[in-house]
Amino acid sequence: MKESDQTRFDKLVNWAQSHGARLHPSLEVYHDDVTKFSLRVKESATSLDTGFIAVTCPLSITLSYLNVLIDGPFVSSSSASETPTFPVRFMASLPPHVIGRFFLIHEYLKGSNSFWHPYIATLPRPEQLGSWALPAFWPKEDVDFLEATNAAVAVEEIKSNVKREFKQARKVLKEEGFPDWQDYSRVLYNWAFCIFTSRSFRPSLITSPSSREQISETLPERCVVDDFSVLQPLFDIPNHSITAKYSWDLTSDPTSCQLICQDAYQPGDQVYNNYGMKTNSELLLGYGFLLPETEQLHNDYVHVRKRQEDSSTDKPKDFLISLRPFDHPGSLAGRARPGGLSSRLQSLRQFSHFEPALVDDLASSLSTAEEEQAIDQPSSDGDIFPRNPLLEGLVGRIKAALTAKLQSDLQKLKEVDIAESEDGIFAVNHNQQLALEYRGQCGKVISAALEALGN
């Protein structure tokens, strides 16, 4: 690690620990070219057995919308200031998650005068775009490499939402005559969005019941605990492993969140947190990385949206198509989806790469009343799926609908005009290489699902 980086993180650890945080004495902040900053076991330390406390973060050093309400660290509800950080109209007209991002900008602009300066100093610098920009804020020539993928659609939605939020928020600051309102730039808002998106936690998951009660007393009416997210200094350093065993202890110290590692680690090992069963599409958009495919594990899924009949009130349903069958041991994110593998149609291997809820949804849309009854009838020969000639037509229609969708998506992937070198598609930077890896895996998912449908 560079000496300047070491100094910044030493100051962070010292500041955090002076306010009640703890870092296991056998752990250190480490940097490498692949995973960047992380936690690892010191090479001079002994092995760590399961159940050790890696990091403890008290609520008093977290940064979020809560701090805007009291214009400072959240120590107790009695410490709440009657005057929040921003004007009353700003607080009343914008959602909590937007206000929280503006508060991060506010503290960044305060520099060393901010209570959180030791923490903010370790975050990627706003002017170093490549160190923090998620795909929604990549240059256009990099975003083009995502064309015809799920991520490309999401990127446009995120950009539109963030642009709208920023314009509305800064307009209010300007009209209210807030000091130095012009310093709250779009680049800083994009930066704050990426910091919160890639590092924050849901309050309900990292606060104890007593802390949540305290938080609820501070929140304004019509605002609930999970209307915003929370940055946790130190706690956000460990990288993600989808297989890492962990727990977040909220009871040993009700004022803090403790990361308990349920894996054993050797000296020099990187110590992981687990961000949950997120697909590579979600990891790319929210964190800027992908999990590579291995023999034991894959994290490659294509997301399929189906809009509801009343699109004004319901969000589109989101379904997954998997590189490997959903019942494969390595399909961890797919197997963790709500509903599990309950679909009777899932017993047909043609549908094994499709989320059971997607197959059920199509069956519900395409089936006749007779076919619906036939699906629910028990099989006389013990098969999970009844062998009924009446259902052959339904299965055929489901296969046809899925095949048409996938063939169309695969053709769109192939039609994208990406510059090629003599040796193939040419990526000139990390973003483009990441996008190429992602679109390549999307193609593999679609091809695998089409192959299954043909059997």
Image: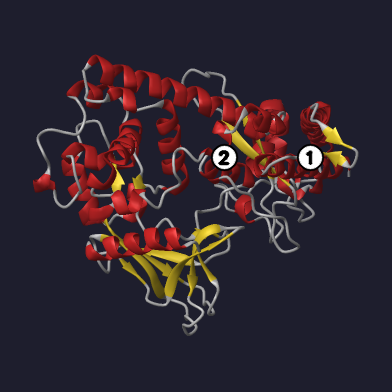
Write down the residue under mark 2. Answer: 285
**Residue drawn at point x = 69 percent, y = 60 percent:** 297
The Cα atoms of the two marked residues, 2 and 1, are separated by: 18 Å
Q: Position of residue 55 (x, y in %)?
A: 37, 66
Above-or-below relation of 211 to 453: below
**Residue drawn at point x = 38 percent, y = 62 percent:** 7
Q: Position of residue 421 (x, y in %)?
A: 86, 37
Question: Are there few (<14), some (14-19), or many (20+) residues within 10 Å of tag 2?
Answer: many
Above-or-below relation of 206 to 413: below
Write down the residue under mark 1. Answer: 443
Is 172 displayed left or right of 440 in the figure?
A: left
**Residue drawn at point x = 75 percent, y = 40 percent:** 427
State the residue in front, 259 or 125: 125
Tell me the kind of residue under disc 1: Gly
Q: Position of residue 35 (x, y in %)?
A: 58, 58
**Residue drawn at point x = 44 percent, y = 58 percent:** 5
State the residue in front, 200 or 333: 200
Extreme-right residue of the structure:
422
Q: Quadrant of residue 364?
A: top right
State the residue in front, 208 or 391: 208
Tell me the kind of residue under disc 2: Leu
Mark sitting on residue 315: none
Is 155 displayed left or right of 447 in the figure?
A: left
Q: Quadrant of residue 423?
A: top right
Give the secondary structure at mark 1: helix
